[in-house]
Structures are given as structure tokens and as C-alpha cells.
Image (cartoon, rainbow, N blue to C red):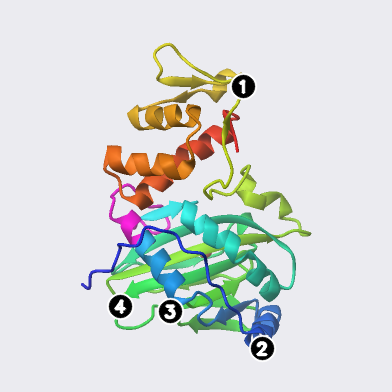
């Protein structure tokens, strides 16, 4: 198997460029058949960055799988994928011809033999985008989508996407005969529709790395043993392992998230991709429980 390049660690600015003439066709297609393939929506540079990031995370052994594709690494709300989710919002809004809220991102690194059963998505997935980030395969692995006019087998090369109505269009894949396929799913809901309540997948915010400072809530303190954070209410407790305890001390010391991530790389031997996701998982948990304000 070819060894994908996973050396990129610095997140570039996304260079999204859109051919408006082509986009009008996509808008009409989406309206008529509830899905549309957009060729090369992601630039080669951006795609390579996200592909490397996904492969690097999958090699950690820290990703979990789900019941939909058992034994295949997957991740909800990866900070970089959430950034992609947010960045593509204006383009997806144009294709869907409506204002949208982003809900969540999810990615998988599929392996040989994987299949995806025919299914529809949950309420957060009113407008869904599946992105081919990269693969090690002889040919593209088609996704099947069923719209009001029948089924279509859609072939995506790296950088291509399909925008589809995830709740309304059943979709599936037959067995993958390549070695590896990195696919990210980006989900949105109509701001003026019945699923608007699923904005951010009912989280306080997306899982992107905060731009500004984070602040410890005034109602929070560490216990004498320094292994538990306690908020105003008993159910706001968070147990601290050594990794989380270290992050917490850095938050209290007013360090920036990039600084905390770099320290986690050097002190815990994590890759940049894993350090960032682990730090943001903890900070997002603290934010959901009212322990930090972002
Ligand atoms: Fe799905």
C-alpha cells in the first residue's frame, strides 16, 4: 500500500474557489433531483492537508468506530473538520438556495471490504455533503443515492463532493475494493425549517479551535486533590486524569489553545492532530458543562 504523506501540521487558509456558471447547474440539479455532484470543490492543497490530517489521526489508535461501519476508525467533531464544515457553509447555502446552520462533521477512514448499508440520516443532516478527501484505490468508490427520480451511482475523485438531502435521500455503498478511503461528512440544517433547533447539533458551539480567549467560570474550583473540577451544580463535575489536569492548569494560566496543543505534543508524545482533538474534546466538555466560557 502506498504510504500517504502525513507530515502537514499547519492548517492553511482554505482556498475555496467557485465557478459560478457551474454552480448554477448544481443549484438546479439539487432542486430537481435532491442531490448534486460538485467536481473539485476542494482545492488540491486543501484536500491534501485534510487527507493527511485524517490519516494521521487514524494512525493513533485513539479513534473509535461505530455500529454503522464496525472496526473502521471514525471521529465526530474533529477541530479541523469542523473548520471545513464552517468554511463550506456559504457554498452549500448557494447550492441549496437557502440559509443554513452548520450542525456537525464526522469522518471515517474506510478499509478494504467496508460497506455502508442503505440508510437515511438523522435530523441534523437535512443538507449533507460527503467529501472524498483521498484514497488508495484503483478507482473511485461509488456512493449510491436515491432521489425522487431514481437511484444514481456517483463516482467521486479526491476533492469532489456530493451535496444531498440526507434525511430524504437513502444512500449506501457496496464493498470497497481499495486499501483506504478518507471521507468526511458535513451536515447542515435550514435556518427557517423545522430542524433549525439542530443548529451546532444542539451544542453551544462547533468544535473549532476558539479564536479568542477562554475563561474559567467564576463558579468553578479544583478540589484539594486537584483531580476533580467542580462547578456550581454537582452534575457539573469532571474527573481529571494527568492529561486533563495538565490542560486545566494551562487554562488557569491563561495560555492560548495553540500553546496548550504544542505542550501536549511535547509532553505527552501525541501527534499534532491527536493533541488538538484531545485538547478540544476536553475544552468542549468543560464548555458544555458551564465550567469554561469561550
Ligand atoms: Fe449517511
**In the rendered image, is residue 134 in sight?**
yes
- What is the chief secondary structure element of the magenta stretch? loop
Q: Residues within 10 Å of mark 4 (few under 14, many from 20)?
A: some
Q: Earlier in the sequence, mark 3 or mark 1?
A: 3
Q: Which residue is mark 3?
A: 142
x and y percent of residue 75 in the render? 43, 53
Give the foreground label among 3 and 1: 1
x and y percent of residue 88 in the render? 59, 66
Q: Residue at x 43, y 79 (%)?
A: 142
Quadrant of the image occupied by residue 269: top left
Q: Earlier in the sequence, mark 2 or mark 4?
A: 2
Quick one: quadrant of the C terminus?
Answer: top right
Give the foreground label among 4 and 1: 1
Q: CA–CA distance between discs 2 and 1? A: 53 Å
Quadrant of the image occupied by residue 180: bottom left
x and y percent of residue 243 in the render? 35, 32
Give the foreground label among 2 and 1: 1
User: Secondary structure under badge 1?
Assistant: loop
- In screen coordinates, is 44 left or right of 139? right
x and y percent of residue 157 in the render? 42, 80
Q: Which residue is mark 1?
A: 218
Q: Which residue is mark 2?
A: 21
Q: Residue at x 28, y 49 (%)?
A: 61
The magenta stretch is: 54-72
Q: CA–CA distance between discs 3 and 1? A: 52 Å
- In screen coordinates, is 149 left or right of 244? right
Q: Which residue is mark 4?
A: 137
Position above or below: 219 against 90: above
User: Secondary structure under badge 2?
Assistant: helix
Amino acid at each position: 500500500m502506498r504510504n500517504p504523506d502525513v507530515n502537514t501540521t499547519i492548517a492553511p487558509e482554505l482556498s475555496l474557489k467557485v465557478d459560478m456558471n457551474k454552480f448554477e447547474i448544481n443549484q438546479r440539479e439539487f432542486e430537481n433531483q435532491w442531490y448534486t455532484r460538485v467536481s473539485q470543490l476542494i482545492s488540491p492543497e486543501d484536500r491534501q492537508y485534510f487527507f493527511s490530517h485524517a490519516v494521521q489521526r487514524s494512525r493513533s489508535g485513539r479513534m473509535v468506530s461505530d455500529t454503522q461501519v464496525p472496526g473502521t476508525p471514525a471521529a465526530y467533531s474533529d477541530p479541523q473538520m469542523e473548520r471545513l464544515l464552517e468554511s463550506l457553509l456559504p457554498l452549500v447555502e448557494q447550492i441549496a438556495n437557502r440559509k443554513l446552520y452548520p450542525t456537525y462533521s464526522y469522518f471515517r477512514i474506510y478499509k478494504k471490504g467496508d460497506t455502508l448499508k442503505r440508510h437515511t440520516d438523522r435530523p441534523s443532516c437535512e443538507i449533507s455533503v460527503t467529501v472524498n478527501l483521498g484514497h488508495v484505490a484503483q478507482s473511485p468508490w461509488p456512493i449510491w443515492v436515491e432521489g425522487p427520480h431514481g437511484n444514481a451511482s456517483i463516482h467521486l475523485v479526491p476533492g469532489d463532493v456530493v451535496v444531498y438531502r440526507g434525511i430524504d435521500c437513502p444512500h449506501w455503498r457496496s464493498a470497497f475494493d481499495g486499501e483506504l478511503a478518507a471521507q468526511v461528512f458535513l451536515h447542515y440544517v435550514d435556518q427557517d425549517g423545522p430542524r433549525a433547533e439542530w443548529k451546532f447539533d444542539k451544542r453551544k458551539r462547533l468544535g473549532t479551535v476558539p479564536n479568542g480567549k477562554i475563561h474559567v467560570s467564576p463558579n468553578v474550583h479544583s478540589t484539594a486533590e486537584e483531580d476533580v473540577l467542580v462547578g456550581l451544580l454537582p452534575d457539573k463535575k469532571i474527573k481529571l486524569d494527568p492529561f486533563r489536569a495538565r490542560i486545566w492548569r494551562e487554562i488557569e494560566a491563561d495560555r492560548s489553545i495553540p500553546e496548550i496543543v504544542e505542550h501536549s505534543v511535547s509532553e505527552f508524545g501525541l501527534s499534532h492532530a491527536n493533541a488538538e482533538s484531545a485538547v478540544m474534546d476536553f475544552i468542549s466538555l468543560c464548555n458544555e458543562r458551564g465550567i469554561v466560557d469561550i
